[in-house]
Amino acid sequence: MIVCSCNIISDHDIRGAVVSTDDELFSAAQVYDCLGCTVRCGRCSHSVKRILEERPVHRARHLEALGAMVVHTEQGLERVE
């Protein structure tokens, strides 16, 4: 599915960029930088962020970067207050 019509980028392109980089990606701008382009109109940013948050490891690292304690449980990731 095309996520960004300005740059003609699909959800597969975004997932590929996330998996292929050693860097942690937290924003559409970082993903697009990996893909060699820039965010133009910004309508895709929410969809890109949602794709980024699909990855459990990425979600845990993002929460930890925000200063949250995260534990892995049978139900998935849980934030500890």
Image (spheres, rainbow, N blue to C red):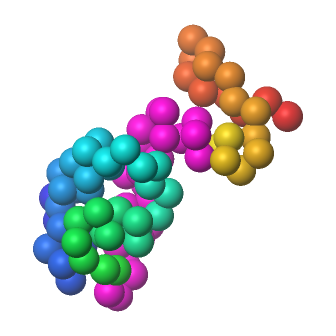
Q: Residue furthest front?
A: 22
Magenta-span inclusion, residue 52 = yes
Residue that sits furthest to the right in the current view? 81
Is any atom of residue 5 visible in this view? no
Task: Based on the picture, tell me whether residue 59 belongs to the magenta stretch.
Answer: yes
- Could you tell me how many numbered marks the image carries? 0
Residue 38 in the image, given as x and y percentages of width and height:
31, 80
Q: Which residues are magenta?
A: 40-62
Q: What residue is drawn where x is 25% and y is 45%?
A: 20
Looking at this view, name the residue that lies furthest to the bottom: 41
Q: Quadrant of residue 3?
A: bottom left
Task: Give the quadrant of the C terminus.
Answer: top right
Q: Residue at x 76, y 33 (%)?
A: 69
Which residue occupies the foreground of this view, 23 or 4? 23
Residue 34 at x, y = what percent? 29, 63
> Residue drawn at (42%, 49%), measured in percent from left and top?
23
Judged left or right of residue 77, residue 68 is: right
Quadrant assignment for the N terminus: bottom left
| Residue 57 at least partly seen | yes
Residue found at x 22% / y 48%: 16
Horizontal side of 81 relative to 28 (left or right) equals right
| Prevalent SS, magenta region | helix
**On the rendered structure, is 62 left or right of 52?**
right
Rendered image quadrant of residue 4: bottom left
Measuring from the top left, give residue 52's x and y in whole percent. Answer: 42, 50
Comparing 20 with 9, the one in front is 20
Q: Position of residue 78 (x, y in %)?
A: 67, 28
